[in-house]
Image: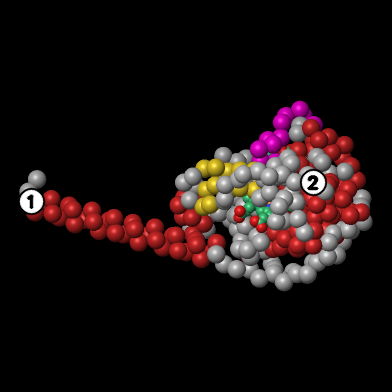
Amino acid sequence: MSNKLLRYGIFVLCGLVALLAVAAAAVYLSSEARLRREYRVDVSLGAPDGSLVGMGRELALSRGCADCHGDDFGGKVVLDEMPFARVVGTNLTPAAGMDDPRLRHEWLYRALRHGVGQDSHPLLMMPSNSYSKLSLREIEAISAFLDTVPPVGRELPESALGPVARTLLVAGKLEGFLSAEIIDHDRPAVAAPPPAGTVDHGRHAVQMCTSCHGVDLGGGRMPHGGPDAPPASNLTSHANGLAAWSEADFILSMRSGKRPDGSTIDGRYMPWRAVGHASDDELRAVWSYLRTLPPIDREAR
Ligand code: HEC
Ligand code: HEC
């Protein structure tokens, strides 16, 4: 190769490297601005009512907190896939420095209703968009329950986003990863859940299913599911959905992870173990509400 050609090659290469560096810096700065954004939440709550512990236990188990915060609620590494991301569910037990019940209640409120952490920054992957519709009583109950859990002192790494997750975030491909960005922070809070066992209670509880099964519960591809995830099933009474199911089938499927035909519901994507911790009353209410929905013709399985 002639000297001239070599110089030209080096010149082009340097240009490319510089271009890449600029793109990487742009992705970093743009994602960092979103991660560092402060969401101010002014809230003043008292210590939670201890009589709500039982209700809080059922909620914490059935709403899947343990899936990401550990069976002992002492925190766990949910995802360790650098250069994508490392995501770590926080220790929720009354550990050192986090043991004032009033402050813990406010902390939980911020995280569940607004998707922000103690430092007012958006939480990663915490599905607060579903939890933001919990009533104040339910948040208080979860808080009361978590105050009774034995403290756990576990060494955990910090959550961090790698270049791959940052690029996807900036490209708009990580829908729902920062719940704080999609929550309506001005929506007024509901004081308490509708009475147990009613269709209204079912409608309220089903709000934890819509992030995957869709607002119309007709199912389909999940926005945040990843390439290998199955579509969420159609939960309406269409033949493509749960037309042939009975209430008993539904309750049994959430307790066993099996459909009436004996096939397995994929527990890596459908949190049936968590949902199965709901009381019979609540599952019946969910079922009665599902049966009020118009059948939707969507193939989702
Ligand atoms: C899909 C996984 C997932 C589920 C389910 C989940 N969380 Fe989280 N949660 C996380 C992750 C991950 C973090 C830490 C995010 C971060 O570091 O930015 C977090 C953070 C929190 C925080 C705030 C911690 C802080 O840093 O200030 C609280 C409080 C919390 N979660 C409570 C709950 C409760 C209560 C439930 C159940 C109702 C729950 N979470 C369910 C993943 C989850
Ligand atoms: C994190 C996402 C997610 C959430 C939240 C979720 N589901 Fe699912 N669900 C799925 C996926 C994905 C499938 C399909 C699993 C498979 O193909 O094996 C499924 C399957 C099901 C099935 C089996 C139906 C069939 O024949 O395939 C039922 C019933 C169901 N979900 C009910 C619920 C209810 C009720 C809730 C709320 C209380 C809920 N799901 C919350 C993702 C979710």
Check the picture and name the quadrant holding the N terminus.
Answer: top left
Q: Earlier in the sequence, mark 2 or mark 1?
A: 1
Q: Is mark 1 within 8 Å of ligand 1?
A: no
**Which residue was labeled with disc 2?**
149
Question: Which residue is the site of mark 1?
Answer: 3
On screen, residue 136 versus residue 179, left or right, reads right
Q: Disc 1 marks which amino acid?
A: Asn
* Distance CA(mark 2)–CA(mark 1): 72 Å
Q: Which residue occupies the foreground of this view, 83 or 183?
A: 83
Name the main secondary structure of what is drawn in magenta.
Answer: loop
The x and y percentages for residue 114 are 69, 63
The location of residue 250, given as percent across then percent down, is: 82, 39
Q: Secondary structure at mark 1?
A: helix
Figure quadrant of residue 11: bottom left
Label 2 with label 1: CB-CB less than 8 Å:
no
Task: Determine the residue positioned at 71% across, 52% down.
Answer: 96
Question: Which label was assigned to residue 138?
Answer: none
Taking the image as drawn, is residue 124 in sight?
yes
Q: Which residues are magenta?
A: 259-270
